[in-house]
Image (cartoon, rainbow, N blue to C red):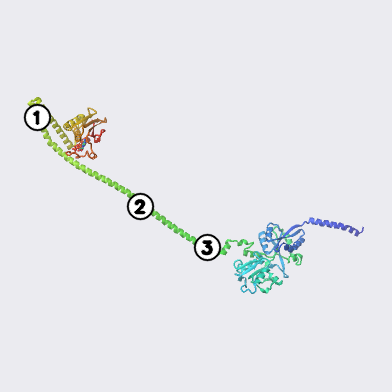
Amino acid sequence: MNRETKWRRLIPLLGLASLLLGLCSDTVLARTELTIGVLAFRGEQDAIERWSATADYLTSSLVEYRFTIVPLSLEGMRSQVEQDMLDFVLTNTGNYVVLEDAYGISRLATLKVRHLGQEFTQFGAVIFTRRDHPELNRIADMTGHTMMAVSKSAFGGFQMAWHEMIENGVDPFTDLERLRFIGFPQDDIVHSVIERRIDAGTVRSGTLERMAAEGLIDLGAIKVLDARESDNFPFLHSTRLYPEWPFAKARKTPEKLAQRVAIALLQLEPDSAATVSAFAAGWTIPLDYSPVHELFRQLEIAPYAYLGKPSLISVWREYKGWIIFSLAMMLLLILMLVLIGRANRRISQSELEFRDEANQRRQAQELLAKHKDELEARVAERTAELAEINRQAQENQAQLAHISRFNTMGEMATGIAHELNQPLTAILNYSSGSLRLLQKRGNGDADAELHEAIVNIGNDARRAAGIIKGLREFIKRGEHKLEHFNLRGCIYSAVELLHPRLVQYGIDVRLNCDNDVIDIVADRVQIEQVVVNLLVNAADAVGAVDRPVKEIGIDVVSNGSGAVAVAVSDNGEGLPAEVIEHLFDPFFTTKSEGMGMGLSISRSIVEAHGGTIEYLVDEAQRPTFRFTLPIA
Ligand code: ADP
């Protein structure tokens, strides 16, 4: 077998081997899938067409990986980055800054854009009006005019101009007459300005030049407001320049892999398929995106939207004047409230004091009234006492007068007794003499009656002398002669003495003595005098009325406790109240010839013996005088 034959035999074997190797390499080098999230601002298809070549380029450069384009909306991209579903991110400048801040994606390269035959890594925005607009020459002139832009969230289509306007003292949301967002394409904005439908507009830098190159507009019809000059940037622009789209890695993506991707991107040739289909000139080292951050911060929009929310500092900056004014007003209000409070307190204090005073006055008045009442009551009491004292004084005076009259009477009685003593003695002597004469004559029975009469004359004269003597002694010295005697006998004597008068009136005397012998120690003559006085009054009373039976009762009762009571009653008319009141007063009498001394003297005698005398109406409704005496 020659050498050629041998090689010919080996060819199929080699083919088989290479096939096996190929299979083997595909199996051994199983590629890891990597995703590149791409912002599909012109739709998914456009994104895929634009960036698939780049993905393929990377797949061919990093053989162990397979890169796939994932077209996403702004929101879809945010969601997938948040869920760590992407390995790389290819998005516009503004969105990159948002995701960088929120999810830590970091740029690997910045896109070099090819525009009108030139390469650019930065872009800006142009704010413009029509050439012949008479009032708009600078951004600061825009206040009060109308403006058109893409959308509030379009970085190059509005936000760059917004930032520039703020820098020039014009707030597009408050200072313009009208602000209209019309979306893409931006060409409509340019037409609107030229056709005078709007005063001013803003578009991404290069748009005007492209439209002019396409013959859509005449750049001479445009007036750029506050046009800037920047190195290596030939397009009209009013704002500073910002870096183009970045290619970024997700937070989870390993550094080494990211480095390899960055190197691959930087090595892309301007005329490579990936570059051309992306309408780019390739990739350059990542630029500084901090101006974008600064812009967002100043505008207080994502990722610095929280700055737009009212914070103490922003509120202070915005409403400093109002806050100071409000604080001043509040202070004034507080001051007024404090002053009013104080005034109120003073008023209430004064009210309290006034009430206190009124209370005190009222209490004083009440006290005064109370004391006045008390004083009046006391005065009335004292007046009554005084009146009573006066009355008693008058009474005492009257009694004094009576006593003095009584004394006079006593003296008179003493005189009379003295005067009567001699005639009575003479009567006694004559009666004794008469008796002796009668005995001498010896006429016996013929003179018997005369004899008895003369004896009686003698007895009565002796009794009369005794009475006068006792009365004189009683009145004169207040003394009485005590003797031991039987009360019953004493009462008999008194009745005997009055016998003629009792007979004259036809009065029966009933003596009821619970004990035959009641011995007492007293002045017998005086006690007999008391009984005589009571019997005389009773006889006068009964004698003055017309009664079938005229009766005087004498009841003597010893009560067993050392006293004896003598009650003299009659069935006369009795005593009226006004008489009862003065019964024992000296000189009180209802009789025309009465002395009014009987009861007065009787009470003096009884009381002098330690007894009592009273008037009462007995059980049979008879007027009764009752006196008591101690038993010996
Ligand atoms: P005199 O008999 O001189 O009037 P008295 O002191 O003995 O004085 O009596 C005073 C008065 O008391 C009498 O005037 C009479 O009005 C009244 N008096 C006394 N005893 C009786 C009696 N038994 N019945 C009615 N009146 C009496």
Callout 3 amino acid: Ser
* Residue 284 location (% of width, % of height): 72, 65
Nearest the eye: 264 or 194: 194
Q: Identify residue for label 2.
A: 365
How far apart are the alpha carbons under marks 1 and 2?
Answer: 96 Å
> Which secondary structure lies at badge 1?
helix
Instruction: Indicate which disc, 1 or 2, sits on the residue closer to the N terminus.
Output: 2
Image quadrant assignment for residue 621: top left
Instruction: Indicate which disc, 2 or 3, sits on the residue closer to the N terminus.
Output: 3
Label 2 close to label 3 by CB (< 8 Å): no
| Rendered image: mark on residue 326 | 3
How far apart are the alpha carbons under marks 3 and 1?
Answer: 151 Å
| Rendered image: mark on residue 434 | 1
* Residue 341 location (% of width, % of height): 46, 58
* Residue 82 location (% of width, % of height): 68, 57
Residue 387 in view, yes or no: yes
Callout 1 amino acid: Ser
The quadrant where ligand 1 appears is: top left
Nearest the eye: 125 or 212: 212
> Which secondary structure lies at badge 2?
helix
**In which quadrant of the rendered image does the C terminus lie?**
top left
> Which secondary structure lies at badge 3?
helix
Q: Residues within 10 Å of mark 3 (few under 14, many from 20)?
A: few
Nearest the eye: 267 or 114: 114
Residue 427 position (above or below residue 14): above
Residue 611 in view, yes or no: no
Callout 2 amino acid: Gln
